[in-house]
């Protein structure tokens, strides 16, 4: 949104696109919403789309594709091996990231699997700015231990710090001094911390991390899935880089890392992903694993149509007027919630709006899953599906006890070019009502719990009849309104 000012003074995000195709939505009655969340075991992942009005679960694979991306899917070379489509994608990646070698995979967690199998051995450490659920699981499966080296401001819910995603360089140096470089499988920085509010990483932090990694010959890996948001924040919050283009910033970031991997469901807006590097030896060794777990080297689990769309999507990721669409809508929604006194993570980050369930539902014991309860309550009262990013998203301790999360967040993702401003305002309105009635909300407990990544398939039940009470209050205040 290039310096748009309004005569009437209101500050609202301006869409830099027009809608040319629509998908019907339904808002089912609150009675059905209560039934649906019960059937889903109070796990928003298990809700069916027919019962959802606004799906803010994730931005993964649900960002709107452009007209040019859709058109590109019709011009493909679908050869199993040696596809010209793959060549176009490989050339585009080299053009943007300045890295020669590219391994295509079906999505981001496939990258995590291959990299963990290759680098991680039993007893090794993987320091990072913050973990992501599947990343941590892959490292643990291969015998490694994740060490989160975030700075204190990372967990401050209300803050003006522009780069709360930075890795703590002092902690990183102390780890190397104590354990030795040979015990560190690799250093990972997530370009935007998914689990603690989508907070970005400063360019200076990337460069300083790279300097340490290269001094000790430790591989430095960037998870670039949220790269687009991080680009926007470096350009708008880091003075030294405000006059550089997104392409120039990208090349500096890319050069700092030995390996960049990404989920194209977030970066590029298609279903796929990839690992890119300039290290020929690493590339050749990873290439041996690719056919076993993904596919041949020129498709790697992706369809050629998705690959053609990715070529265009990566180009569009270099357009500031495209990549700002997520952050400016998130900033608007966060600002409105702050005005209403609703606890939300600040400053606004990428990916989505992150409600601070730790404070929102401070009357519920953390062992009763505050963020999960808030997700259930919001769905019941609005039809809006968010994602729990708190204790449910953690793995249990070895003794079977809960690992209580450092933060309890309900993430409301705002995928790019998907929701209208009226839909965002509707969500704000329902949150305002819910916050006013928050004392009616109670806790949850598991009745069906997988051993790994329980947040995907686990089922919970309310610890009391609080959901029926919430519905009764809604109907008393809203009558027959949906």
Image (cartoon, rainbow, N blue to C red):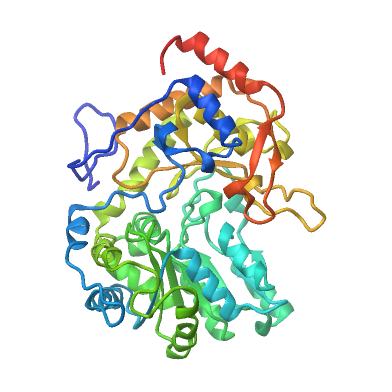
As rendered, which of 14 and 211 lies closer to the eye?
Answer: 14
As rendered, which of 459 and 10 lies closer to the eye?
Answer: 459
Q: Is residue 103 above or below residue 318?
A: below
Residue 284 figure quarter: bottom left
Percent x, y of residue 390 = 62, 45
Residue 340 can be seen, yes or no: no
Percent x, y of residue 72 = 19, 62
Question: Residue drawn 41% across and 75% down?
Answer: 295
Task: Give the residue at the far right of this rendering.
Answer: 399
Q: Is residue 191 above or below residue 92?
A: above
Question: Residue drawn 60% across and 31% down?
Answer: 360
Relative to 154, is 319 on the left or the right? left
Percent x, y of residue 194 = 51, 54
Relative to 396, is 242 on the left or the right? left
Question: Residue drawn 60% across and 67% down?
Answer: 138
Residue 276 figure quarter: bottom left
Residue 383 can be seen, yes or no: yes
Question: Residue drawn 33% across and 57% down?
Answer: 269
Percent x, y of residue 337 = 46, 31
Which part of the image, by quadrant, shows the C terminus? top left
Total numbered labels: 0
Task: Give the residue at the far bottom of this rendering.
Answer: 281
Q: Is residue 461 above or below residue 71?
A: above
Relative to 191, is 369 on the left or the right? right
Relative to 159, is 295 on the left or the right? left
């Amino acid at each position: 949104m290039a310096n748009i000012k309004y005569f009437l003074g209101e500050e609202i995000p301006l869409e830099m696109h027009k809608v040319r195709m629509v998908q019907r939505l339904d808002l089912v009655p609150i009675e059905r919403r209560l039934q649906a969340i019960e059937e889903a075991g109070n796990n928003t992942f298990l809700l069916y789309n027919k019962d959802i009005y606004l799906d803010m679960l994730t931005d993964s694979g649900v960002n709107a594709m452009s007209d040019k991306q859709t058109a590109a899917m019709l011009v493909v070379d679908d050869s199993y091996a040696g596809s010209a489509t793959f060549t176009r994608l490989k050339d585009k990646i080299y053009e943007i990231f300045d890295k020669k070698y590219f391994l295509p995979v079906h999505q981001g967690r496939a990258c995590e699997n291959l990299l963990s199998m290759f680098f991680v051995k039993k007893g090794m450490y993987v320091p990072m700015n913050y973990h992501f659920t599947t990343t941590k699981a892959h490292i643990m499966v291969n015998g490694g231990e994740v060490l989160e080296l975030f700075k204190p401001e990372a967990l401050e819910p209300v803050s003006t710090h522009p780069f709360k995603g930075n890795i703590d360089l002092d902690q990183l140096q102390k780890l190397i001094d104590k354990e030795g470089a040979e015990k560190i499988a690799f250093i990972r920085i997530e370009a935007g911390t998914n689990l603690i509010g989508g907070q970005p990483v400063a360019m200076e932090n990337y460069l300083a991390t790279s300097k340490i990694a290269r001094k000790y010959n430790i591989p430095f890996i960037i998870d670039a899935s949220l790269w687009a948001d991080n680009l926007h924040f470096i350009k708008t919050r880091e003075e030294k880089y405000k006059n550089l283009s997104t392409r120039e910033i990208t090349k500096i970031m890319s050069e700092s890392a030995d390996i960049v991997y990404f989920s194209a469901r977030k970066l590029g807006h298609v279903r796929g992903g990839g690992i890119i590097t300039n290290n020929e030896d690493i590339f050749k060794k990873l290439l041996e694993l690719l056919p076993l777990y993904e596919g041949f080297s020129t498709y790697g689990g992706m369809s050629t149509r998705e690959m053609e769309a990715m070529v265009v999507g990566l180009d569009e990721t270099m357009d500031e007027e495209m990549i700002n669409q997520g952050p400016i809508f998130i900033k608007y929604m966060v600002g409105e919630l702050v005005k209403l006194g609703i606890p939300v993570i600040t400053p606004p980050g990428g990916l989505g709006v992150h409600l601070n369930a730790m404070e929102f539902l401070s009357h519920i014991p953390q062992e009763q899953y505050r963020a999960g309860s808030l997700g259930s309550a919001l769905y019941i009262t609005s039809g809006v599906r968010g994602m729990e990013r708190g204790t449910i998203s953690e793995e249990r301790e070895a003794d079977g006890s809960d690992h209580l999360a450092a933060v309890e967040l309900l993430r409301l993702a705002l995928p790019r070019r998907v929701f209208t401003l009226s839909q965002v305002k509707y969500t704000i309105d329902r949150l305002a009502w819910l916050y006013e009635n928050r004392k009616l909300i109670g806790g949850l407990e598991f009745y069906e719990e997988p051993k790994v990544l329980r947040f995907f398939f686990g089922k919970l039940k309310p610890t009391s009849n609080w959901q029926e009470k919430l519905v009764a209050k809604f109907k008393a205040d809203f009558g027959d309104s949906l």
